[in-house]
Every structure is written in C-alpha cells, then in structure tokens.
Image: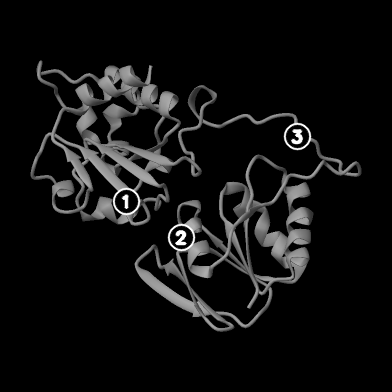
Amino acid sequence: MKIVAFTIEGNGTYALDVPRFAEAIKGAAADLILVAGNSRVKRAMPAAALRAGAAIDTNVVDIALDGDKATVQRWAYRQRILTAFTRTARPWVVVTDPSLFAALCEKAGVAPAALPDAAAAATTRTTCNGVVAAGNGGASTIKPDSPLLFVAGAGWTKKQADGAAHLDEAAATITGFLAKSGASLGSSKSLVDMPEAARAFSFMSHMNQVGQTGSTPRHAKGLSTCCHGEEPHVVGWRFIGERRAVNLDANCGWAQGKADVLYVADAFAVMKKVNELLG
C-alpha cells in the first residue's frame, strides 16, 4: 500500500484550492492520503476528492495498518461512540486534526510533505482582496487552528475579595490574554447563559461554548479558568493533549484526575500576571 501525507498551510480561496487539491490527489498516485485538517483543508478537500474520484473521511482520530488494509477510527453521535471502519475504494483521503497528524504519520511510516501554494490562475474570476475576521472589534475569538484553547467559566462573574463583582475587569483580562497569546476562546454553558454577563462579555456567545452540549475543541493545549471541570464540561476536552486549570476550589472536578496541572489560585491574579509577562 502506497501512503503519502500532505500539510497545507496559509490562506486560499475555494475556487483555486479545489482544482489544486484534486491535482495533488491524482498526482500522488497513492492508495491512502493523509492530510492535516485545518479550516482551509476541511473547506475544499471534500470537493477536491469528489473531483479526483477519491473517497474521503474527515475528523479521523486513529489509523491501523494490516498489509493492504487500513482501518480508521472517528467519533460519532456527538463524540459518544468511537467507530472503526475501512474502505476498499482507492484513493482514500483521510483528514485528521493537526494535533494528531504527526502521530498518525508516524504510525503509517510516512514523512509529511508540504503542498506548496500555486500562483493564481489567470482565468479565474475571483480575487482575494484580504481577510476580514468576524467578531467584536474585527477580531474573531474562535480560532480552530490555534494551539491553545482558553476557557472562561462562571467564576469570572462572582464576587471577589472586596465583596463586589468586577465584570469589566474580567472582560479586559480575558480579551487582553487572547490578543497577546492568540488563543481561541471557549466558555462554559453557565457563563454564556448568564444575562448579567452579556454586556461585559459581548465578545462571547453560545458559539464559544465547549463541553458535552457544545462543540468539541481540538487544540494541543487547554487552559480552563474559573470552571468546575465536572464531566459535562470535560467531555468536550477529549482531544486536548495537555490540560491545565485555575480554580480556587482544591476539590473541584479538575482535581479528580481531569487536568494535568491544577493551579489552586485566584484566576484574576494569575491571568493578570500572565498578561504582564506576555507584555
């Protein structure tokens, strides 16, 4: 079985990416093609596979090889059931998450190669004049390709040592860290459901919610602040390799073997210091 692996970086347009990716699939002349699935790949690769006459599966989390047979795994039913299956169709494009790509390439015994960007075709009618990010102030808080997920919980809205809540200070601390670190923002369900937090945390919506009832993040590292860490919340962290949490409660859910490191401290003070260190 011939296996190749591609990484595709940078920005691109759908109209140009689809024929380029299809050409790369055909040119590889491989049985199995592993691709690191950033947002650009997930947008254009399915159409490219169809154009190239290839089968494709996305969000693959593991792969096993047995001669000419390849078996992959992916989650189903909101990440409650782990399925394993194989395909006879060739070529077969397997798209995995960037954080898992290196490990799957190692298991498959292949070295990834970067797919270079080609010059825009002269016949295209579409030109890319720039990128405008959605979100408050023109800055998006949801960044699937970021290596770090920063999650804020309801503790940011609670009364502090002086007996008062400091929502504006909390919002400034969170947005300051996001701007300096480039992290993606997550939120617990309890925080995005709070009416009193809607004004101060206008940069946050239910789109940022992570956990059993929200999206499943796939970042290399996760930092949870003021979150209890109980099972409904932790379910959404299954693909995060390194988990850290900041919580004043030493007996919170994160302390029950759900975090690699738990800082029993005041998140206001910790994140203020982190922002100072980041400059």
The numbered dot on residue 128 is 3
Q: CA distance from mark 2 to mark 1?
A: 25 Å
| For the residues bearing labels 2 and 3, Cβ distance under 8 angstroms | no
Mark 3 or 1, closer to the camera: 3
Query: Looking at the image, which is closer to me, 139 or 25?
Result: 25
Q: Is residue 24 above or below residue 73?
A: above
The numbered dot on residue 63 is none
Please identify the quadrant where the N terminus is shown: bottom right
Q: Is residue 265 left or right of residue 3?
A: left
Q: Is residue 96 left or right of residue 77?
A: right
Locate residue 196, reporting x and y percent.
27, 27
The numbered dot on residue 211 is 1
**First reached walking from the N terminus: tag 2 or tag 3:** 2
Which amino acid, by three-letter code, is at mark 1?
A: Gly
Locate residue 76, reporting x and y percent.
43, 68
Mark 1 residue element: loop
Locate residue 54, reporting x and y percent.
70, 71
Please identify the quadrant where the C terminus is shown: top left
Locate residue 134, reporting x and y percent.
55, 32
Mark 2 residue element: helix
Q: Is residue 55 above or below residue 5?
A: below
- Can residue 212 be seen here? The reply is no
Identity of the residue drawn at 66% across and 61% down:
46
Q: Is residue 115 above or below residue 152?
A: below
**First reached walking from the N terminus: tag 2 or tag 1:** 2
Query: Looking at the image, which is closer to me, 179 or 279?
Result: 279
